[in-house]
Image (spheres, helix red, strand yellow):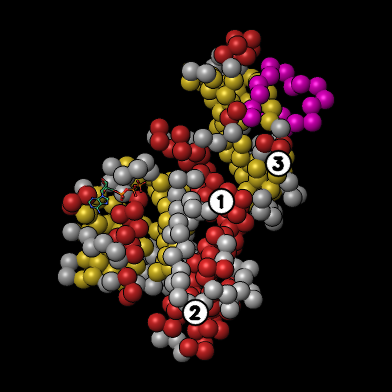
Amino acid sequence: MPELSGPAVRLDARVDARDVELALTVREGELLAVVGPNGSGKSTCIQLLAGALRPDSGTVTLGGVVAAGPGVFLPPHRRRIGYLEQRPLLFPHLGVVDNVAFGPRSRGLPAAAARRRAGVELEAVGLAGFGGRRVHELSGGQAQRVAIARALAIDPDLVLLDEPFAALDAAATPELRRLLRERLRGLTTVLVTHDPLDVLALADGVAHLAAGRVVLRDGVDAVFQWPQTRFLADFVGLNLLHGTAEGASAVRLPSGGVVAGLAEVDLRGGGARAVFPPGAVSLFRDAPHGSPRNELPAVVTGVEDRGLVQRVSLDVAGQRIHADVTPSALRELSLGNGDAVVAVVKATQVTLHPAS
Ligand SMILES: Nc1ncnc2c1ncn2[C@@H]1O[C@H](COP(=O)(O)OP(=O)(O)OP(=O)(O)O)[C@@H](O)[C@H]1O
């Protein structure tokens, strides 16, 4: 079979007035998370891809087609892009099914076929039977599901997600993340987010933007274990251990240890990650007897004074985690680099995620 030529998305474009110059590629079927501080260029990135903004120089290539470049500019409706924003922005004068059918219809599908397609998409987001509803009869979470159905009903070449859960109440978010994870499988996607859990649950890779430039492009595991910038370290703020799923509620590390936790999504075997905050880790010189908790043999690789807490960096058989301990606990343990310790974490403080 011939190799697919080039990435699904290639952005290499400059917007003079914003001093934004972004260069990045996204592989076919990859979900790339774009993160960065306020004003770093995340929205500009989305606008360039969507066709809401024309670059002053450079090119935007989508599926091998130049969408923007010297003498070329495809407006949004000529790009096959599924767009999901913080707010669902449904047409208030149309019913649910017509909101979803609008895209396929305006791309030339006959009315009946477009409505059939809309029905399939609504069913896939758990809203079978909601087609006849009015938009104002939906909850915030249901409206966002309709927006997902609408975004995917056009068979997009590229899906853009701009803080898709930011406006939802926290209780609705895990279910929607699960749904998006399932619905986006195999679709090339760019996700802008301020939430590390979105990155964990959805992303294959991460692009870190600062001052209008891509300063780092890395895999999710690497970003969590070895954040290369202060921003990323603060952004992730969580420990991640990579391994393979062991049953429904544990991850087996390559070194052999097992970390039990709580799984939001069915792990289904294969790669899996255990995630927990540094504050959930206690350190001991020797394994505490009879503890039902996760115990991980580790070696101290550094101690950083963070004011109220001391952040201890630990090597767990080649993977890195952090423990936040009080200054007095650190003094009691009198820890130094190279010391062997046992890191203990309660299973209820560990969440487990499938690794894509
Ligand atoms: N409409 C605009 N006109 C001129 N400059 C703009 C405009 N929108 C954004 N900028 C500038 O472009 C740069 C990138 O902004 P952008 O909105 O892309 O950042 P962002 O990462 O999305 O920020 P946030 O997290 O606050 O949404 C910033 O310096 C910003 O001030």
Rate crowding at label 1 as few (under 14), some (14 to 19) or many (20 or more) other CA atoms within 10 Å. Answer: few
Residue 289 covered by magenta stretch: yes
State the quadrant of the C terminus: bottom right
Instruction: Please report the bounds of the magenta region as a residue range.
Output: 280-296
Name the foreground residue: 346 vs 225.
346
Kindly identify the amino acid type of the residue bearing the numbered disc 2: Asp
* In the displayed structure image, the side of residue 88 where residue 174 appears, left or right: right
**Local secondary structure at mark 2:** helix
Compared with 84, 325 (above or below) is above
User: Quick check: marks 2 and 1 in contact, CB under 8 Å?
Assistant: no
Closer to the eye: label 2 or 3: 2
Residue that label 2 marks: 98
**Does mark 1's beta carbon lie closer than 8 Å to ligand 1?**
no
Kindly identify the amino acid type of the residue bearing the numbered disc 3: Gly
Residue that label 1 marks: 169
Kindly identify the amino acid type of the residue bearing the numbered disc 1: Asp
State the residue at coordinates (23%, 63%): 54
* In the displayed structure image, the side of residue 216 where residue 96 appears, left or right: right
Instruction: Measure how far apart labels 2 and 3 are at the Cα level.
Output: 43 Å
Q: State the image coordinates of residue 98 (x, y, percent, origin top left).
A: 49, 79
Disc on res. 261? 3
State the residue at coordinates (60%, 68%): 125
State the residue at coordinates (67%, 36%): 349
**Local secondary structure at mark 1:** loop
Residue 25 visible? The answer is: yes
* Tag count: 3
Name the foreground residue: 23 vs 130.
130
Q: Earlier in the sequence, mark 2 or mark 3?
A: 2
